[in-house]
Structures are given as C-alpha cells and as structure tokens.
Amino acid sequence: MNRHRVIAVSIALAVVAAVLPVVLAAWLAWQGALNAENARLTNVAELALARAERSFRGAAQVLGTMQATTLAPCSEAHIAHMQALTANTPFIEEVGYIAGGMLRCSSWGVVQTQVNATPADFRSADGIDVHTQVQPLVAQGSTMVALQQGDYNVLILPARLVDVITDRDVQIGLRASNGQWIATSAGASAQWLGEAHPDWLQAQVQGEGWQAVAMQPREHLRGALGRELLWLLPIGMLTAAVLVAWVVWLSRKRLSPLAELALAVRHEEFVVHYQPIMQLATGVCVGAEALVRWQRPDGTMVRPDLFIPLAEESGLVQPITDQVVRAVVRELGTLLAADRSVHIAVNLCAEDIKSGRILPVIDQALHGTDVRPEQLWLEATERGFMAPDSARQTIEAARARGHSVAIDDFGTGFSSLQYLQNLPLDALKIDKAFIDTLGAEAATSSVTGHIIDMARALNLFIVAEGIETQAQADYLRARQVDFGQGWLYAKAMPAEQFTAFYQHCKAQVGSGPAVVQVARPGHAQAGGGPLPSAPLAK
Ligand SMILES: Nc1nc2c(ncn2[C@@H]2O[C@@H]3COP(=O)(O)O[C@H]4[C@@H](O)[C@H](n5cnc6c(=O)[nH]c(N)nc65)O[C@@H]4COP(=O)(O)O[C@H]3[C@H]2O)c(=O)[nH]1
C-alpha cells in the first residue's frame, strides 16, 4: 500500500472509529429504552392478569358454595348467605339465584324478574358460562361481566378486573383465549385495543384461559431513551476517542520511515544500479560498484544515502545487503561467468564486517552458479573496521574464499592508521570529498596526495571515487592511482546498460586482469600477485 492509500485508509478508519461507537451507543440506548418500556408494560399486563385470575377464582368459589347450599331458595337465610358472600369476596358486586328463566332473588333481596336467557359468550375451562355484556337487573348501572354456573350467577365490574396502578395513559384489556374481550381499563375500548397502533407499544401476557394486553404511547420511550443515553453516550464517545487515537497512532507508525522501510524490505522493493570502475592507466572497465536504490511502488527512486543510515540504525541494512548480493548474481551472473575480468563491488554494513554473517549468505548466492568469489569485492566504511579483532577475522575469512576487501570513503570518518596497517585489506577507496578538492587549491587537496602515498606504502590498491573532470583523472593517473569511478566515465546504471557499457568498453580497449587481489606483506592469506599481471587461477 502506498503512502496516499495508507492516509486515505487511515482517514476512513478514523471516521468509522469516531462514528461507529457513538452510533452503537445510540442504538444500544434505543434498545435499552425499548426493553425497559416493554418490561414495564409486560409487568402491568401480568399484574392485570393476576388480578383477573384472582377475581375469577373468587367468583368460582362463590358459585361452588351457593350450588352446595341446602338453604331454601330466596329464604331470608339464603339471601343473607348470598349477601355475606358478596360482602366477603372482593370484586363481586352481586350474587343471584335464577330459576325457571327468572332472577328469583339476589344479594339485594327478592327480585322475581324475568331473565333474558342469552347464550354465554364463552365457557371457561372449569365449566363456567361467561357473559361479557350484562346489564344488571337490580343494581342499575354500568355493564358487568356475569359468571354463571347452575342456578347461580355472580356479577363483576369489568374495570375492577384490570384495575392496576399505573400511568394514566397506559391502557389495559383482558380477553378470553377465544379472543372475546372481557374487560378494558377506563378510557380504553375493546375495539381500539384489538387494532394495531404503530405509535403505541404493546405487551401481552397469556394466562390459563385469559390474556392481558397493555399498551402505552411510544412517546414514553423518549424519557427512557434520555436515561439510557445519559450513561451510554459518554461511553460511546470515550470509546470513539480511544479508537481514533489508536488509528492515528497505528497510521503514524505505519507511515513512519522505519515502517515504510521494513515493508520495502519485506516486499523486496530494492533495485541495484552499477557504476563502472575503470583502470585509470588503460581506460579498461574492470567491473562496477553495486549501488542500491529503493524503488517505491509508485515508481519513484529513493537514493541510498536517504535510507541506508536508517537501515543501518535499525538492522534492516542486513536483509537489504542480502537482496543486493542476490540481485548481483541474478542480473550479472551470466556476464561474470562468461568474463572473469568483470568484478562487482558490494557495500557491506559495519555489523556484517564485525560478525561475518554475510559470508555464508554470499556462499549461498554463488552456490550452483559459475561466478567466482574473486569476482565479488567487498567494501565497508571505516566504521566497519573499528573493532579490529572481529573485523580481521571476517576479512581473513573473506579473503580465504577469494573475495577482495576494500575500505570505503577513506578519510571521512574516524580513521586510525594503526588498525589500517594491521588489517589484511586489499584496497582503499578515496572518498569523493578528496577528489573534489583536486586542482581547487583547497587546503585538503594536498591531503589526497598523502592518502595516495600512504595507500601505496601499505601496498593497497587505490580506487578514487567521484571523478568528474578530466583534470582529476589526469592527476590521479599521474599519481598511479589504480582505479577510478565517477561521472566522467559513467553514472550508476541498470544491469542491462552496464553489460552493454562493459562490452563496448571491452571492444574499444580490451579487458582487465582476472584477479585483482594483492598480497599484503605479512598477511598469510595473500592471494594472487599485484595488479595488473595477476593470473586467473581456474
Ligand atoms: N556527485 C557525484 N557522485 C558520484 C560520482 N560518482 C559516483 N557518485 C556517487 O557516489 C556514491 C558512491 O558510493 P559510496 O561511496 O559507496 O556511497 C554509497 C554507499 O555508502 C551507500 N550505499 C549504496 N548502495 C549500498 C548498499 O548496497 N549497501 C550499503 N550498505 N550501502 C550502500 O550509499 C552511498 C551513496 O550511494 P549513491 O547515492 O549511489 O552514490 C554513489 C554514486 O552514485 C560523481 O562523479 N559525482
């Protein structure tokens, strides 16, 4: 993913992280309010159902008691018995005795009124006929529910069945399991309760033979929603803030140069360019220095001096070096196998010089190819040689394999001539900064001559870096500097172009020596003879 996409994805994620928890909190608050109000309504319906069932049980008991009585019908004692039961049984308004289609007497006294025998609206499970709309004959007033069994009936005020303490705008209804409405709370109608009302919440509770329904306007939700939001919204906002901070932290981490570099290493986004190295005396091309570039997914090239310091600091330089070594063998293996005069110098990091880790990596890269270790030169800056004992071991192991080892950018760092003298190096590369001063009358220009003299005294090959003018080349050739590289000859170029450059050069001036490793007096691993007459030992 390139930088722009990472930024775009991060912004999208941050927006989601900011919005989602708040939306979720609002949704949870809504669900919480809905559940709370439904639970409240269900509770009201349960209370109503319990009250109705208690009433019906009481009525059934009264009917059972009267059926069992042996008192003479409508006698004083009979009527007194009915009165006592009416007084002692809550919800019951009247007990009546019916015989021969006439209400003979009731808890009110002797009546002798014709009863219109209408079929019951339904019969309950325990065999009691229920008439839901009965106009009392004695106690004139509102319609009542009559429960009749045998010669007796009891009258109940329907509103009493659903008389539950609750909010004023909660409406309650009670109906039999066949759907017949038995009672409704004050202000509600059975027809209204039986219809669907989207603006109202409804709860139903099923009992044995009865069903209680409670309804209330949805506006009640507003209050409950406010209460839920009061604690859920701050949690949602806090979560959003934490998530946004986390997304920002992650994206900053992902966008950090180190993360980008680590990703580049993982995706192998590095390409290698080759800068020709010329033998100054003859103009022969003896090889090239492999210089890495970071090719970003959008095609832009990043210069190594912009990412190598970070790579060295973080340890990522090692996998980068490995990729460079593999690229050299992959891209130039054919040329190197076909022409032993071609050498490629690879830059090593200080850590690899200290540890020697790179040597088996190179062995592995060369394994199965026809490229000789002598054709790979190893370069490292002065920093790599600051731990002389371990550096010595690595250099000796490298030279034993056939590689030549050079000290790079000489003179720019902390150079100790003592360790330079004691290390079995093959070559010294004079940094461009010293080449730039040549002919410039600068104070440092005289230093260049001293570096050349010193390298010569140490029997090291000399490679001059960054030659840009003919005057610089002439001076270096006059001072018998062996090799040079710089824009005067060629800039670093892709492998294909370098192969063409080399072939052209070879056709013009011929090829160089096969082995350029030089014997250092006092060093046991000394290989071939001095340049340029070193033979190729095959
Ligand atoms: N102005 C000017 N510049 C010239 C001229 N001739 C050569 N150069 C530049 O000088 C640098 C020489 O490489 P270096 O001293 O090893 O310095 C290298 C080296 O220290 C490091 N580097 C490059 N590739 C690798 C690598 O694979 N591994 C490691 N560890 N470091 C590398 O990055 C440094 C910079 O590399 P580059 O940007 O490729 O820059 C290269 C090259 O392009 C010239 O005539 N004029």
Image: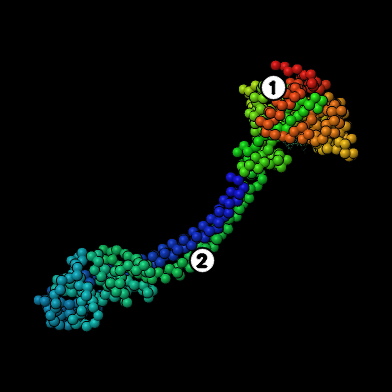
User: 252 and 144: which one is in front?
Assistant: 252
Q: Position of residue 25 (x, y in %)?
A: 49, 60
The N terminus appears in which quarter of the rendering? Answer: top right
Q: Which residue is mark 1?
A: 339
Which element is circle 2 on? helix
User: 225 and 475: which one is in front?
Assistant: 475
User: Residue at position x 43%, y 68% from top?
Assistant: 221
Q: Is residue 392 placed above or below 212 in the rendered structure?
A: above
Q: In the figure, is residue 482 to the left or right of 266?
A: right
User: 483 and 518: which one is in front?
Assistant: 483
Q: Which residue is mark 2?
A: 230
Which element is circle 1 on? loop
Locate residue 422: give its quadrant.
top right
Number of residue marks:
2
Indicate which label's residue lies in the foreground, 2 or 1. Answer: 1
Q: CA distance from mark 2 to mark 1?
A: 81 Å
Q: Is residue 449 placed above or below 223 in the rendered structure?
A: above
The C terminus appears in which quarter of the rendering? Answer: top right
Q: Splitting the image into four quadrants, where does ligand 1 fall?
A: top right
**As drawn, which residue projects farthest toward the left?**
100
Q: Is residue 454 placed above or below 44 in the rendered structure?
A: above
**Mark 1 close to ligand 1, CB under 8 Å:** no
Res 356 visible: no
Pointer 2 local density, CA inside 10 Å: few below 14, some 14–19, many at least 20: few
